[in-house]
Image (tube, helix red, strand yellow):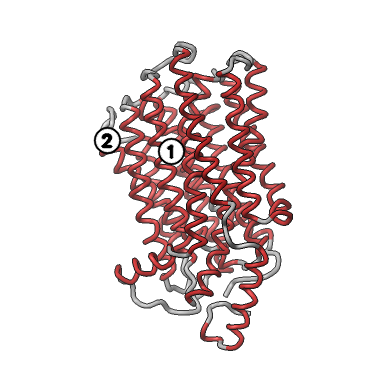
C-alpha cells in the first residue's frame, strides 16, 4: 500500500494538487460564463439554459457513483486510479472545445447544449473522481489529508481564476462580455490547460501509486456495483455530511452562476474592476490555504466547517442588504467596489474553508465504513460527494436562471440600463435563498459524528485487526 502516517513529500502534494486545475477550469466555465454566453451571446432563453445545465449536472451526478465503483474495482499494474486519468484527458479537451464552439454557428437547441454539457461533465468526472479518491490511499493522517485538499483547492481555484483573468483581460478585452470569438478562444485555451493538468499530475504520482492493488476485485456487474454503492451511501456519517454539503454547494452554484449578472448590472464593474476581482478571489484562496490547517488543529474539521458556513453567508449578504437599504456607496464608484472587494475576500475565504473541510471529512468516512464492513470504498464515497455537489450545484444554476428570468433583465441588456426594480428583485431573492441554504448547511455540518479522536482510535483498531489477521484488512500497519 502507498499509505503513510507522517508528512508527504512536497513534490507529491504539488503534483496531486495540480490535477485539480482541470476541475477549476471546468467549474469556472460552467459556473461563471456558460449561462451568460448561451443566453446573452448565443440567444438562448435563460430559463432553458439553466434547465439544460442543471439536467446535465443531475445526469452526471447519477453516473458518478458508478464511475467511483468502477475506479474502486480497476485492477492494473498502474493501480486503480491512474488508467482513468491517462484515458480521459484528451477526449475531455476535445469536448470542452465543442462546448464553446457549438456546431452550426446559430442559436443552439436545448438538446444540443444538454448533450455537450453531459459529455464534458462525464469526462471530467472520469478524471476528477479517481484523482480525488487517491487522497485516503496516499495517507491516513488526519491533518495530511487536509493538506492534500488544501493543495487541490489552491490549484483548482488558481486554474479557474487564471481562466477568469484571461477571459476578462485577454479573450473578452476587446469585444466585451458579449464577444463570441472571445469565448471560442477561451474554450481552446482551457482545453490545452486541462490536458496538461491531468496528464502531468498522473505522471507525477505514477511512481507512488502505480502498483497492483492489494486485492483483486470480483468481476464487475451492475447488480453488485449498485449494491455496493447503496451500502456505502447508507453510512450515517456520509448522509449527515451530504445534507450539509448539498446546501453549501447549492449556494455556491447559485452564487457563481449569478455573479456576472450581479457584477455587471448591480455593482456596475468596469473592465479594471474585473481585473482586480480575479486578484481578490486569489487572495481569498491564499488566505484560506494558510489558515485552514491551524483551524483544523485547534477546532477540528466539523466545527471549523459549520462556523465558517455562518461567517460566509453573513459576509456575503451584508453588501446587498446595505445597498437595498440605500446606505451603500453608489454602484460603480471606487468606494463601492473597494468595500465590496473587502467583503468578498473574507466571505469567499470562509466559503472555501467550508468546502475544503467537507472534502477532507469524506476521507475519514472511508475508515469508518471499512471498520463496519471490512471493505474500502474511496471511489464510491468521493463519487457520492460529487453526486451531492453536482445535484446541488445544478439546483443552484437552475434557480439562478429562474431568478434572472423572474427579475425581468432582458437579453442583451446594457449595464446601467436595467431598472432598479429588476435589480432589487434579483438581489432580494438571491440573498433570501443563500441565507436559508447557509443556515441549513451549518446545522448539518455541526452534527458530523467523526472527530480527530474518533479517527485516530479507529486507525488503531484497524491496525490491530490487520496485525492479528493480515488477510482480513487492506490496511498495512
- Which image quadrant: the N terminus? bottom right
Height in image: 143 above or below 169? below
Based on the displayed image, in which of its 4 quarters is residue 234 positioned?
Answer: bottom left
Mark 1 falls on what kind of element? helix
Mark 2 falls on what kind of element? helix
Q: Is residue 231 left or right of residue 289?
A: left
Question: Which residue: 49% across, 71% down?
Answer: 376
* Residue underneath mark 2: 110
* Residue 301 x/y as whole percent: 64, 55
The front one of 448 and 281 is 448
* Residue 101 x/y as whole percent: 35, 35
Q: Residue furthest bottom?
A: 468
- Numbered mark located on residue 197 in the image: none
- Numbered mark located on residue 396 in the image: 1
The front one of 237 and 330 is 237
Based on the displayed image, in which of its 4 quarters is residue 269 positioned?
Answer: top right
* Residue 381 x/y as whole percent: 47, 62
- Which image quadrant: the C terminus? bottom right
Question: Which residue: 27% across, 35% down?
Answer: 110
The reply to whether discs 2 and 1 touch (Cβ–Cβ < 8 Å) is no
Q: Does residue 154 appear anywhere in the picture?
A: no
Height in image: 317 above or below 389? above
The front one of 424 and 9 is 424
Amino acid at each position: 500500500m502507498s499509505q503513510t502516517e507522517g508528512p508527504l513529500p512536497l513534490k507529491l502534494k504539488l503534483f496531486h494538487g495540480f490535477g485539480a486545475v482541470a476541475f477549476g477550469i471546468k467549474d469556472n466555465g460552467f459556473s461563471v460564463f456558460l449561462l451568460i454566453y448561451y443566453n446573452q451571446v448565443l440567444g438562448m432563453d435563460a430559463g432553458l439554459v439553466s434547465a439544460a445545465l442543471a439536467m446535465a449536472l443531475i445526469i452526471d451526478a447519477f453516473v458518478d457513483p458508478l464511475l467511483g465503483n468502477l475506479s474502486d474495482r480497476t485492477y492494473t499494474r498502474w493501480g486503480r486510479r491512474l488508467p482513468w486519468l491517462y484515458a480521459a484527458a484528451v477526449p475531455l479537451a476535445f469536448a470542452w472545445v465543442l462546448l464553446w464552439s457549438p456546431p452550426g454557428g446559430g442559436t443552439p437547441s436545448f438538446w444540443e447544449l444538454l448533450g455537450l454539457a453531459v459529455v464534458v461533465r462525464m469526462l471530467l468526472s472520469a478524471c476528477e473522481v479517481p484523482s480525488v479518491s487517491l487522497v485516503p490511499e496516499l495517507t491516513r493522517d488526519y491533518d495530511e489529508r487536509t493538506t492534500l485538499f488544501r493543495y487541490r483547492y489552491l490549484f483548482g481555484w488558481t486554474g479557474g481564476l487564471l481562466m477568469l483573468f484571461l477571459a476578462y483581460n485577454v479573450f473578452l478585452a476587446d469585444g466585451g462580455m458579449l464577444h463570441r470569438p472571445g469565448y471560442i478562444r477561451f474554450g481552446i485555451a482551457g482545453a490545452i490547460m486541462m490536458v496538461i493538468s491531468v496528464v502531468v499530475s498522473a505522471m507525477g504520482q505514477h511512481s507512488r501509486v502505480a502498483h497492483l492493488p492489494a486485492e483483486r476485485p470480483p468481476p464487475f456487474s451492475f447488480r453488485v456495483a449498485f449494491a455496493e454503492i447503496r451500502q456505502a451511501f447508507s453510512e450515517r456519517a456520509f448522509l449527515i455530511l451530504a445534507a450539509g454539503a448539498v446546501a453549501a454547494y447549492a449556494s455556491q452554484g447559485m452564487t457563481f452562476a449569478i455573479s456576472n449578472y450581479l457584477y455587471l448590472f448591480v455593482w456596475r464593474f468596469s473592465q479594471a474592476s474585473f481585473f482586480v476581482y480575479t486578484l481578490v478571489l486569489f487572495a481569498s484562496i491564499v488566505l484560506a490555504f494558510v489558515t485552514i490547517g491551524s483551524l483544523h488543529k485547534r477546532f477540528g474539521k466539523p466545527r471549523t466547517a459549520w462556523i465558517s458556513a455562518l461567517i460566509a453567508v453573513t459576509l456575503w449578504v451584508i453588501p446587498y442588504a446595505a445597498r437595498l437599504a440605500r446606505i451603500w456607496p453608489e454602484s460603480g464608484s471606487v468606494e463601492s467596489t473597494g468595500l465590496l472587494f473587502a467583503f468578498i475576500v473574507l466571505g469567499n475565504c470562509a466559503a472555501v474553508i467550508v468546502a475544503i473541510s467537507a472534502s477532507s471529512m469524506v476521507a475519514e468516512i472511508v475508515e469508518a465504513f471499512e471498520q463496519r464492513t471490512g471493505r474500502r470504498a474511496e471511489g464510491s464515497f468521493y463519487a457520492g460527494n460529487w453526486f451531492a455537489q453536482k445535484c446541488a450545484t445544478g439546483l443552484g444554476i437552475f434557480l439562478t436562471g429562474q431568478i434572472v428570468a423572474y427579475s425581468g433583465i432582458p437579453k442583451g441588456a446594457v449595464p446601467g440600463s436595467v431598472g432598479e426594480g429588476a435589480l432589487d428583485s434579483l438581489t432580494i431573492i438571491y440573498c433570501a435563498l443563500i441565507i436559508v441554504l447557509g443556515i441549513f448547511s451549518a446545522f448539518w455540518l455541526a452534527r458530523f459524528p467523526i472527530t480527530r479522536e474518533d479517527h485516530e482510535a479507529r486507525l488503531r483498531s484497524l491496525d490491530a485487526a490487520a496485525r492479528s489477521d493480515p488477510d482480513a484488512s487492506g490496511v498495512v500497519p
